[in-house]
Image (tube, rainbow, N blue to C red):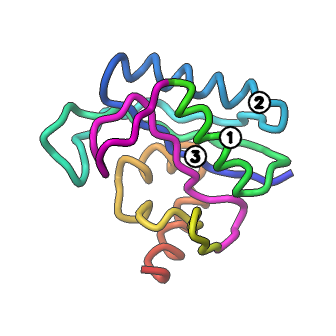
Amino acid sequence: MATAWLSLGANIGDPRAQLAQAVQAIADHPAITVTAQSSVLTTAPWGKTDQPDFANMAITVETSLEPIDLLDVLLGIELAMGRVRKEVWGPRLIDIDIIAYDRLVLKSPRLTLPHPHAHERDFVTVPLAEIAPDTVAWVMATGQNLA
């Protein structure tokens, strides 16, 4: 089993309810166990600022899925919840990102690990620090070196 750390965010609809729904959908997958979850943090939008504030959180999962397979599961959950990708950094019903997967460094056309912008985003690092401070330190150091 591998350990992965995920960041979740939402800013339209009922963000807190959507975060809870996403965590439940992740936990319901037979190859994923949610082992920790942060509190929900309200943050100003990043990148595109003319939109509602976000509700953000982080979770730790144990999984038998490989990173790309985990990504596909998470994208499927987003789609099932109604996520439509219209604009980069735009409003969203749900966003689920893999921040780190074990201590794997990966660059592929579909997935970069650790998440290439995690070290720049307090809405990722603050909730993650609540449940995995050692992982935040690794993501910060590794992300800065990859940038």
Q: Are marks 1 and 3 in contact (CB under 8 Å)?
A: no
Q: Where is residue 19 in the image (x, y as percent from the top left)?
A: 49, 26
> What is the magenta segment's predominant secondary structure?
loop
Amino acid type at image mark 2: His
Between disc 2 and disc 3, whose residue precedes?
A: 3
- In the image, residue 127 above or below residue 52: below
Choose the circle earlier in sequence order: 1 or 2.
Answer: 2
The answer to whether residue 86 is magenta is yes
Nearest to the eye among marks 1 and 2: give it.
1
Whether tag 1 and tag 2 are in contact, CB under 8 A, the answer is: yes
The residue wearing badge 1 is: 73
What residue is pinned by disc 3?
6
Q: Residues within 10 Å of mark 1 (few under 14, many from 20)?
A: some
Q: Quadrant of residue 68?
A: bottom right
| Residue 13 marker | none
> Marks 1 and 3: which is nearer the front?
1
Magenta-colored stretch includes residue 89? yes
Task: Determine which residue is flagged by label 2.
Answer: 29
